[in-house]
Image: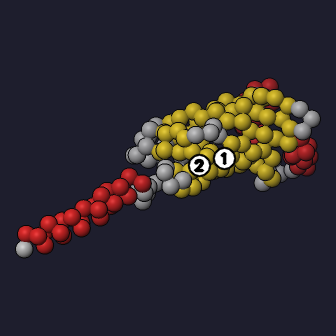
Amino acid sequence: MMRRQALRASALGPWIMLSAGCATVLPPSDLKAPEISLNDLSVGRFDLKEMVFDLKLDLKNPNAVALPLSNLRLELALLGVPVAFGQGPTGSFTIPPQGSSMVPMKLSVPFGKITDSMRSLRQNSSGDQLYQLKGSVAWGPLALPLSFERKGNIRELLARFLPQAR
């Protein structure tokens, strides 16, 4: 009888360990993507093919748990047309619960996209000149994708970073 109980206990041990380990690997069921905003934007370099902006992306964690993140990707669209693409730092970073983190990035704009977007902006007479920042990050050890998005008026964005454009 004792031997059977010992056998059952030893058989349950790995299952208990496995379920405890999964709790640290799986995300909470109500996990939310970080909220994003541009905090700093400057021209890093330009050549005949592209202009590269240095930017700082402010990522805010709306969750009660830390967000271990990696593989940050970003796309900027003007009037619905993607014009710039960026990738965050290599490696991983963590945003504390209910906290924020400033993440440096490079945003690449091919010159062909600049001229196309300027033409579209001039042709758009509705006044609704919208921009969209969208992207994704990978969460935790399973690299589960979390998508984020922010929309706004291009004029407000330019006024924030180029005060003379008001």
In the rendering, at what x and y percent does residue 63 appear? 44, 47
Quadrant of the snapshot with the N terminus = bottom left
State the SS at label 2: strand
Left/right of residue 64 with respect to residue 103 in the rendered view: left
- Structural distance between the alpha carbons of marks 1 and 2: 6 Å
Q: Are marks 1 and 2 in contact (CB under 8 Å)?
A: yes
Quadrant of the snapshot with the C terminus = top right
Q: Amino acid at mark 1?
A: Arg
Residue at numbered disc 2 = 137
Q: Residue at x 18, y 69 (%)?
A: 7
Left/right of residue 79 with respect to residue 112 in the rendered view: left
Q: Residue furthest top?
A: 164
Q: Residue at x 64, y 33 (%)?
A: 104
- Residue 131 shows in this picture: no
Residue at numbered disc 1 = 73
State the SS at label 1: strand
